[in-house]
Amino acid sequence: MKKEILFHAAEYIRLSREDGDKAESDSIGNQRKLITEYLKDKDDLILHDIYIDDGFTGTNFHRPAFQRMIADIEAGIINCVIVKDLSRFGRDYIDTGKYLERYFPEHEVRFISITDHIDSMKQAYDLLLPIKNIFNEQYARDISKKVHASMKAKQRAGEFIGAFASYGYKKSPADKNKLMIDEYAADVVRKIFQLYIAGYGKIRIASMLNEAGIVCPSEYKRLNGDNYRNSNRLESTSYWTYSTINRILENEMYTGCMVQNKKSQRMRGKAKVQDKKDWIIVKDTHEAIIEEDTWNKVQDLLKRRTRRPNLHTNIGIFAGFLKCGDCGRTLVKKGRTDKMGREAISYDCGTYVRSGRQYCTPHPIPHFVLENIILDDLNTIIQRMDNLHAVIEHSLAAANATAAPANEQEKNRIIAELEKVRKLKKTVYEDYRSELISREEFTAYRQDYQKREALLEKRLEGIAQQSTVTPDIWESPWIRRLLEFRNMETLERDIVVEMVHEIKVYEDHTIKISYNFSDELETLFKAEYSRR
């Protein structure tokens, strides 16, 4: 009597909405029920385990449960695979064929597809099997196009279609396509933005959050019961990192905009990052966590890409504002010891530090000297503003008589400077093409020139619109804000961020300060204040 062979079976189940699976007939529950009924009268089949991939496409085999099943086959634990139908196994006809016609026979694995009436132990594969696989893939391809078109339409309508909301938000219980604020996480987001404006670096912010016992976004979602998986995070990383802080600071969703379509994915292959011009952004779709003014300040600071100039606390009141007046590169922090043996902070030209004296000179300036200069300069401006009404009234009569020639002179000066900046833009591009400077240097120079060009163009527009001095300047928010800082004794980071546009240091120790309120006071004070 021939002994019956026992098979240790794997029950494989897969479901994905994206490749056209139907909720009624192909649900997880339906598949399990069908396979369980099939196994009832099969004495030669012993169910070893159930492998479920819920929410994974059939167009590739990068599925966790499927890979776990293959590992068990390799280990000799199972030697039979049972599925409801071929489309549950896979929709890629090439790779599906490799498993059915090569891999399973080589590993002596029995394959059963119930509704297709396939059992590799009882009969050879149906000659139509490859054709069925092709139809399965074509069906998935067609449905995929329709699903993506529907998703794009929802994105353009400002509906949220992601699986998980950005940290700080949660899906509305009444409408999964709407976002609402998660107050606990939103407070953490606000704190991150405030700390960054205050001068803390991204690494330091991450350390502060970790020290405070605040769980990182991925852990927070997991603790809230979300089946969240971060493909960029190492399994052992359950804490705040530099990259997490950076992503939060760059996430425009916090301003109330719905930002989607940042990645695209074809039926096969990995998702690819889209150019920003292809993102779908819809304004005012949900409540903002970060105010627009705060968002703009942070984005400006991020573009400056500077180190924080405090050796111990990683805080710097001038971070992002110091430039070499000769080469235009950022000044970098240097720790020095003075004659008394005390540690002191100063700033040197970044080009000199990286490339040597043949490219630029040190331009050294001690931190306390620079701080005193800015503080004295701001206090001087504020003191003069105490008599601002009188200054304006006195200026009106003279300005009305001389406005036209003065404006024309200023216009010619700005046009000449604008032409110079555009020539410099062209020159730096030619230097980059000739490989005289790196791509990073070219990008940094170009951003500086573009910023200067935009400022000059704005001033030209202002001259064209303004023919006389008006007393409305007193209503400027900059002037009102300046008066709030009357009699300052110390210089804080938030004052620098709010008031200063740029500080240039020259080799001859000239300091040129550009303020954010230059336009408002252009007719009363100089836009830039120089000190020696």
Image: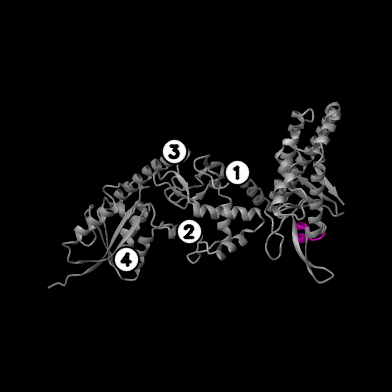
Tell us which disc is closer to us: 4 or 2.
2
Residue in the foreground of this view, choosing between 49 and 442: 49
**In terms of secondary structure, where does tag 3 sit?**
helix
Residue 201 drawn at (x, y percent) = 64, 59
Q: Is there CB contact under 8 Å for labels 2 and 1?
A: no
Local packing at callout 4 (Cα closer than 10 Å; few below 14, some 14-19, many 20+) is few
Residue 173 drawn at (x, y percent) = 39, 47
Instruction: Residue under label 4, please give it.
Output: 106
Residue range in magenta is 349-358
Magenta: main secondary structure: helix
Q: Is residue 126 above or below residue 471?
A: below
Label 3 and label 2: CA atoms lie apart by 29 Å
Residue type at mark 2: give it: Ser
Q: Quadrant of the N terminus?
A: bottom left
Instruction: Residue under label 3, please give it.
Output: 153
User: Of marks 4 and 2, which one's residue comes earlier in the chain?
Assistant: 4
Q: Is residue 223 left or right of residue 325?
A: left
- Residue 30 in sight: yes
Residue 383 drawn at (x, y percent) = 81, 45
Label 3 and label 1: CA atoms lie apart by 27 Å
Instruction: Residue under label 1, please give it.
Output: 292
Residue type at mark 1: give it: Glu
Label 4 and label 3: CA atoms lie apart by 47 Å
Instruction: Residue under label 2, please give it.
Output: 218
